[in-house]
Amino acid sequence: MGIGGNEACNAVLSVLRSTATALSTDILKQCSTRATMRVFDQSEIDYLFGYRRGVSPQDAPEQGSGFVQAGADTVRVFKAFFMLPSDIDAAAVQIAAHRPDLEVDAVRAAGQAYATRLERMRYLYSTPAARTALTPPAQIDLGITDPRGQPIA
């Protein structure tokens, strides 16, 4: 299975049920992190996490609860909370404090594109009214060309 391997990214696969008809064993064996929301059938937990893991549907009785396993860790119960759109800004501020720093080599490789990313994002994701007060970001020469030999900016 080579999903995302060539692109050097982590693929996220989502299925509605953890059964052999929805999730093949070939894919399941390659999943290092597994999660499911509340289920009512023990066989779905057993199929996803392996048999005799010590968890049952009764361990996650509430809406929004589920099970998660990362790597070889034990299966844990979690509770996800419903978030209203009005709560997103406060959550984003809290989450922003937990972002890891980019590695020095990545910063050097990305160069100006990385250094000016926040200004470009601020402009691109602003409303048309807010853009009137912002300076459009300058194009960045990435030092690469398209198949016709034209520079990509």
Image (cartoon, grey):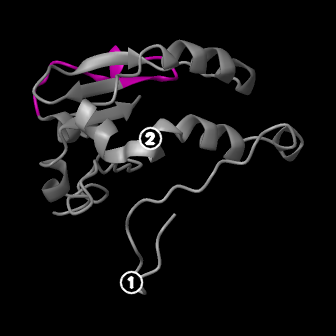
Residue behind mark 2: 114
Q: Amino acid type of disc 1?
A: Pro
The local secondary structure at tag 1 comes to loop
On the question of residue 40 being in view, the answer is no
Compared across the picture, whether 25 is left or right of 99 comes to left
Q: Quadrant of the N terminus?
A: bottom left
Taking the spot 52% from the left edge, 55% from the top edge, the residue there is 140
The numbered disc on residue 93 is none
Residue 121 in the image, given as x and y percentages of width and height: 61, 41
Mark 2 or 1, nearer chain start: 2
Q: In front here: 127 or 103?
A: 103
Q: Is residue 53 magenta?
A: yes
The crowding category of the residue bearing disc 1, from other C-alpha atoms within 10 Å (few below 14, some 14 to 19, many at least 20), is: few
The answer to whether the residues at label 2 and label 1 have Cβ atoms under 8 Å apart is no
Residue 90 in the image, given as x and y percentages of width and height: 65, 14
Q: Main secondary structure of the magenta part?
A: loop
Q: CA distance from mark 2 to mark 1?
A: 24 Å
* Vertical arrangement, residue 147 with respect to residue 41, above or below: below
Taking the spot 75% from the left edge, 21% from the top edge, the residue there is 86
Q: Amino acid type of disc 2?
A: Tyr
On the question of residue 77 being in view, the answer is yes
User: Which of the 4 image quarters holds residue 3?
Assistant: bottom left
Compared across the picture, whether 31 is left or right of 61 comes to left
User: Which of the 4 image quarters holds residue 36?
Assistant: top left
Start and end of the magenta stretch? Answer: 51-66
Q: Is residue 68 magenta?
A: no
The local secondary structure at tag 2 comes to helix
The numbered disc on residue 147 is 1
The crowding category of the residue bearing disc 2, from other C-alpha atoms within 10 Å (few below 14, some 14 to 19, many at least 20), is: some
Residue 147 in the image, given as x and y percentages of width and height: 38, 84
* Vertical arrangement, residue 13 with respect to residue 86, above or below: below
